[in-house]
């Protein structure tokens, strides 16, 4: 699971930056009804989201319940946030139910699909995860996390060609965001690392080493990536650089 601060930042990027989308169905999903789909999280729910990210689930639920009782509450956002509470607790089955309910209430609210993909992937339901991320991609084109998730699924299904395509598309989009001024170091690092896994599975250790070096150049805080880089150098017979990578791995672990 992502660290709380990172996950809140991801949610804010998804839900706050989008603003208000084009018109669509109302939050009840009533046939034929049209109303603006509010993508920006209602600011009355922001304290509950932060409590959820901090692991204070019951307090978060209390605030969400109070919000839901308001006459102008957005039911789909309240339901989504209940799923976020469960997601932070790693209660992925319960989170999935809430995200699916939120998506039924408002199919055009894209954060529900994004986090539904994460919940389904954590539960091992790869077809459902793929469907959720593909729906999010339709609603929110250009989001690298969707391509990254789809690449993970392809890798787990041992479809290495599809995995490489999707991961490289994720990399391109994250690089595009970074060039525009967004902080994407962590995302770039994890994508390079997954490409390294792909190269390693193919037995291409020089390419795996290069991808791991690209990963740590973007984000230095993953002991797992430093360990994999250490292993790559060992396989390639570079004892000096292996020792350097191992020392960095140990330093990162000490700082946890």
Image (cartoon, helix red, strand yellow):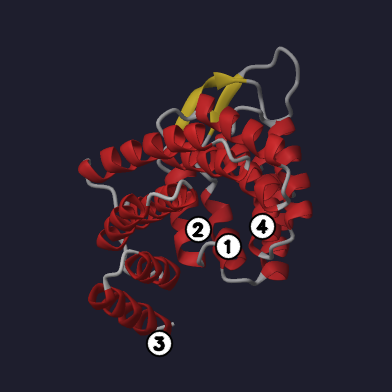
User: In the displayed structure, does residue 81 sit left or right of residue 150?
Assistant: right
Q: Looking at the image, is mark 1 or mark 4 earlier in the sequence?
A: 1
Which residue is drawn at the image coordinates 76% and 39% (left, top)? 101
Report the side of 202 relative to 240 (left or right): right
Relative depth, front residue between 196 and 104: 196
Separation of residues labelled 4 and 3 (CA atoms): 28 Å
Asked whether the beta carbons under mark 2 and mark 1 sit within 8 Å of each other, the answer is: yes
Mark 3 Cα-neighbour bin, 10 Å: few <14, some 14–19, many ≥20: few
> Marks 4 and 2, how far apart in space?
11 Å
Question: Residue beneath label 4, please?
Answer: 87
Q: Which mark is residue 254?
A: 3
Of the residues under marks 3 and 2, which one precedes in the sequence? 2
Mark drawn on residue 120: none
Q: Say which residue appears at 74% left-offset and 56% top-offset.
A: 65
The reply to whether the C-beta atoms of the residues labelled 4 and 3 are less than 8 Å apart is no
**Pointer 1: what residue?**
1
Q: Who is closer to the viewer here, 167 or 161?
A: 161
List the residue tagged with mark 2.
7
Q: Earlier in the sequence, mark 2 or mark 1?
A: 1
Q: Is residue 221 left or right of residue 180?
A: right
The residues tagged by marks 3 and 2 sit, at their Cα atoms, a distance apart of: 23 Å
- Above or below 125: residue 243: below
Q: CA distance from mark 3 to mark 1?
A: 20 Å
Camera-nearest label, 1 or 4:
1
Q: Which residue is at a point 44% across and 82% down the rendered structure image?
A: 256
Q: CA distance from mark 2 to mark 1?
A: 9 Å
Furthest residue in direction front, as rendered: 237
Dot 4: within a 10 Å radius of its alpha carbon, few (fewer than 14), some, or many (20 or more) residues? Answer: many
Q: Is residue 93 visible?
A: yes
Rendered location of residue 146, percent (x, y): 50, 38
Q: Quadrant of residue 91?
A: bottom right
């Amino acid at each position: 699971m992502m660290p709380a601060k990172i996950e809140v930042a991801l949610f804010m990027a998804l839900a706050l930056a989008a603003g208000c989308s084009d018109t669509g169905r109302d939050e009840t999903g009533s046939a034929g009804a049209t109303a603006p789909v509010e993508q920006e999280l209602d600011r009355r729910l922001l304290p509950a989201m932060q409590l959820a990210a901090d692991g204070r689930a019951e307090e978060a639920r209390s605030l969400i319940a109070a919000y839901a009782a308001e006459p102008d509450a957005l039911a789909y956002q309240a339901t989504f946030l209940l799923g976020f509470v469960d997601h932070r607790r790693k209660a992925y089955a319960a989170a999935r139910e809430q995200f699916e309910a939120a998506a039924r209430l408002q199919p055009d609210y894209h954060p529900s699909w994004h986090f539904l993909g994460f919940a389904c992937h954590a539960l091992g339901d790869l077809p459902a995860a793929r469907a959720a991320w593909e729906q999010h991609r339709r609603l929110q084109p250009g989001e690298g996390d969707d391509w990254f998730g789809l690449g993970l699924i392809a890798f787990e299904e041992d479809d290495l060609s599809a995995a490489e395509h999707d991961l490289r598309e994720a990399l391109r989009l994250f690089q595009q965001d970074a060039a525009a001024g967004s902080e994407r170091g962590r995302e770039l690092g994890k994508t390079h690392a997954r490409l390294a896994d792909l190269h390693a599975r193919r037995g291409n250790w020089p390419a795996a080493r290069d991808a791991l070096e690209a990963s740590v150049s973007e984000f230095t805080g993953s002991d797992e990536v430093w360990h994999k880089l250490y292993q790559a150098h060992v396989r390639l017979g570079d004892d000096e650089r292996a020792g350097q990578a191992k020392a960095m791995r140990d330093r990162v672990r000490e700082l946890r």
